[in-house]
Image (cartoon, rainbow, N blue to C red):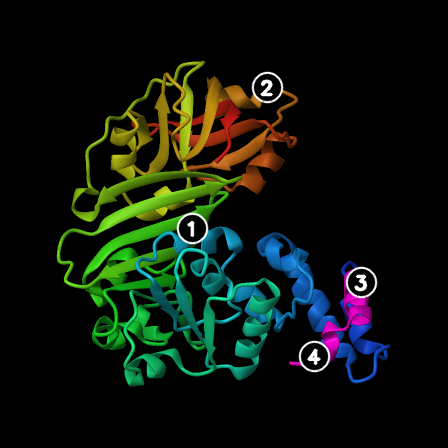
Amino acid sequence: MNNKLLAKAVQDYINAHLNADVNQIALAKSPFEGITAAELATQITAKRKSEKKLPTWFNAEDIYYPPVLSIEQTSSEITAQYKSKLAKGNTLIDITGGFGIDSYYFAKQIKAVTHCEINPELSTIAQHNAQALQATNIEFKAEDGIAYIQTSDTSFDTIYVDPARRAEKGKVFMLKDCTPDIASNLDALLEKSSRIMIKTAPLLDISAGLSELKQVSEIHIVSVKNECKELLWIIDKDYNDDTKIIAVTINNGIEKDFSFYKSASNGSVQFTDNLNIGNCLYEPDAALLKSGAFNLIGSTYDLSKLHPQTQLFSSEIVNEDFPGRIFKIEAVLTTTALKKQGNLKGNVIVRSYPAKPEDLVKKYKIKADQDQFLIFTKVANGENIVIKASIIQYY
């Protein structure tokens, strides 16, 4: 950590060049003694990437930024704030502390937080920033979190871990493919805590994760603006009951959730071929789709499903508690009828339809429109249809 980067003149330079070409800055001579051009470029790039993801850090003074990869991998403030509510007790250890976003928000809920980070440089940066943000109840350990827990006599009310996928692994992965290997170390962790919270990427298969873990009381599927961000696995010591799945959507500060027990995920649903003008069309948020409880979505919100493989639903009424988009149906057309219409406008959505959106836009000469939608899909009898609709509720 180069403390010279925290000098006021350097910070002013960084702030003044947030919209500059960082490649030119990296190749030019540094205007500051003891600071390389590459260091300036890294600070500018990392701070720029933090503006929306980490506004507290972006707007604070004397923040020191790590390499850009750490910013890309860290939790956003929105998801960190959510998961902080899932911790319990007075003590928590974050054994994969990283840049310290999660630890900072845990410290708002928990009396004493321990941040473990195996990278000494990143640990020092996180500690400096915590002091800059006046988070005084976080203790920093520049060491391997698993090793620290195993050798420490201290127990914690909650253990939090964000395992990283090993570089050689592809998109499909299991917990055993991550570092640290939580599945293999689970018994050791449960000796030191009654609650373990594991964050994973959303592409981890829920059934596969459950097969590797035990005593999973809850799985939180967290999405922000219809983008599934993370899975949070809550393991409670001595818990041996059914796992509760909670799909959580966060949009502009508003949280909605859809929850059920894993054993009840395969419910029944009614289907409909009759889509009347003025009715509502419901599109579930990404978090609900990740849950896999497609039929349960319909029965929970009293909706009729269009087709077994099409996760679209309809109803005569608007239910603003629904986590997802709601459209008002303005017309239901065959593709033959659509061809006869000119001046088509709308965002194109394709669900179980044998064509790509970009090809349909080109074929029917559809112009973009923010609030109008053309939804190409099929109904229960297998017929392909096009629904013209306007948006009532965004995610």
* Prevailing SS of the magenta stretch: helix
Residue 378 to residue 135: above or below: above
The residue under the point 21% across, 43% down is 265
Q: Which residue is mark 1?
A: 82
The location of residue 149, given as percent across then percent down, is 32, 79
Amino acid at circle 2: Gln
Amino acid at circle 1: Tyr
Query: Which of the two labelled residues, at mark 4 and mark 2, occupies the earlier sequence position?
Result: 4
Q: Is residue 322 left or right of residue 28?
A: left
Which callout, 3 or 1, points to the residue nearer the camera?
Answer: 1
Q: Secondary structure at mark 2?
A: loop
Q: Which mark is residue 17?
A: 3
Specify the segment rendered in magenta.
1-16
Label 4 to label 1: alpha-carbon separation: 32 Å
Q: Which residue is mark 2?
A: 341
Label 2 to label 3: alpha-carbon separation: 50 Å
The residue under the point 39% across, 73% down is 95
The residue under the point 57% across, 65% down is 71
Query: Which of the two labelled residues, at mark 3 and mark 1, occupies the earlier sequence position?
Result: 3
Query: Which of the two labelled residues, at mark 2 and mark 3, occupies the earlier sequence position?
Result: 3
Q: Secondary structure at mark 4?
A: helix
Q: Is residue 121 left or right of residue 218?
A: right
Residue 223 to residue 95: above or below: above
